[in-house]
Amino acid sequence: MAKRHCRRDYLFRLGIWGILMVLGNYLMNLFVLRKDYAMSITGDNIFLTLLVGAIIVCLWDNHQEQKRKRLLRVVSVILVVIGIIPILEGSFIIFPFMLITQITHQNIKQRNLSYLALMLVMAVIVIKMALSIGTSYPLMLFDSVAMNASDTFFILIVPLLSFYSGKLGKYDKQLKYVFYLFYPLHLWFIHLLASLLCR
């Protein structure tokens, strides 16, 4: 029961912060930022991505009777596939990453191999897109690859995961909301700076 309660609280918290950031992005666009530097209402909002990703995990890890369990897992996979559409920030990499993590959390070797397979699939897709810009100028080519292929570097998290003990950190309660505040504030600041300085 406690596990279900914690999940519900987490989903609710992500939803509230997602809505707050949608509102913040909209107000920034309306009153502060120049049109060229406007923020995406849903695209610049990791809270919405994490909310849907957490829903995907909950649907997969449901405790319903067998027939309903299979149906909810199918819905979970469908949401991962829908994540390919670039509506939410990083959904095409974060959704499969979260589902892989849930499915393989008791088998570290299988988890890491699955992450590697995901990285290779993503690398083939994004590098092909990056090279399709049709230029032989090395700097533009490098920039295109760097911008498009950056999501494949999620694989660098694997060594860090080996340090995770499954327990809350020493300063968990004190730092709980630092990320929730830092994430929107730093994006709003970057867009504001770009809007003010770039002509």
Image (spheres, helix red, strand yellow):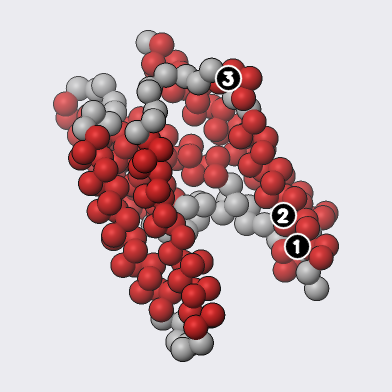
Q: Quadrant of residue 106?
A: top left
Which residue corresponds to the image point at 49% horizontal and 83% vertical from the top-left? 138
Residue 125 appears in the picture as rendered: yes
Query: Is residue 197 rendered to the left or right of residue 40?
Result: right
Query: Is residue 70 rendered to the left or right of residue 129?
Result: left
Which residue corresponds to the image point at 40% horizontal and 73% vertical from the top-left? 129
Tell me where residue 27 appears, x and y as whole percent.
Answer: 76, 49
Say which quadrant the N terminus sits in. top left
Badge 1 element: helix
Which residue corresponds to the image point at 47% horizontal and 52% vertical from the top-left? 90
The amino acid beneath tag 1 is Ala
Residue 57 appears in the picture as rendered: no
Tell me where residue 177 appears, x and y as whole percent.
Answer: 63, 27
Question: Tag 2: Cα neighbours inside 10 Å, few (<14), some, or many (≥20)?
Answer: few
Which residue carries the number 2 mark? 190
Q: Quadrant of residue 149?
A: bottom left
Query: Is residue 178 rendered to the left or right of residue 78?
Result: right
Which residue carries the number 3 mark? 171
The amino acid beneath tag 3 is Tyr
Residue 1's place in the image compared with 48, above or below, is above
